Image (cartoon, grey):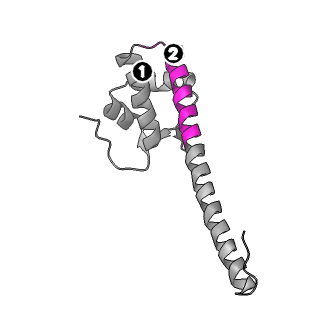
Amino acid sequence: MGTVIPDKLYYRIGEVEQITSVPAYVLRYWESEFKLLRPKKNPAGQRLYRRKDIDLVLRIKTLLYDERLTLEGAKKRLRGEARAAAQMDLGLRDAALEAALRRLRERLRALRERLAGPQGRRAP
């Protein structure tokens, strides 16, 4: 069963501590070690975590406690996962651009044929 995370925009460090079962001092330490973990701070200096930050804390916890990776090993794994996700995003974007270009080419061909009329039809 997965961890239940209340649906909120921001979570204070105490809430993150309860949700993830990771002590606040460890969360603060992980912020210094993992560049991806950067919660916002309000004007009073309190940390405000987003859902993505909590997901990252849970991922780091899994890498360190369950998979028994070192800090360096966990950092390396997270960098690899971030690169793979970025490449996948680029691949999806490239596929969407290719499909849009195909549709545009078809529309231009149809428009060219309409403008040429019946007398001027020729092969593309």
Residue 117, quarter of the rendered image: bottom right
Does the magenta-highlighted stretch encompass residue 75?
Answer: yes
Mark 2 surroundings within 10 Å by alpha-carbon count, few (fewer than 14), some (14 through 19), many (20 or more)? few
For the C terminus, the image quarter is bottom right
Q: Is residue 115 above or below residue 2?
A: below
Q: Tell me residue 31's x, y (percent).
A: 53, 27
**Of marks 1 and 2, which one's residue comes earlier in the chain?**
1
Q: Amino acid at mark 2?
A: Gly
Q: Residue at x 55, y 20 (%)?
A: 76
Q: Which residue is mark 2?
A: 73
Magenta segment: 69-88
Q: Residue at x 41, y 42 (%)?
A: 11
How far is disc 1 from disc 2 in space, using C-alphas?
Answer: 8 Å
Specify whether residue 43 is in view.
Answer: no
Q: Secondary structure at mark 1?
A: helix
Q: Secondary structure at mark 2?
A: helix
The dot on residue 63 is 1
How many discs appear?
A: 2
Toward the viewer: 109 or 43?
A: 109
Is the residue under label 2 in contact with that under label 1 (CB below 8 Å)?
yes
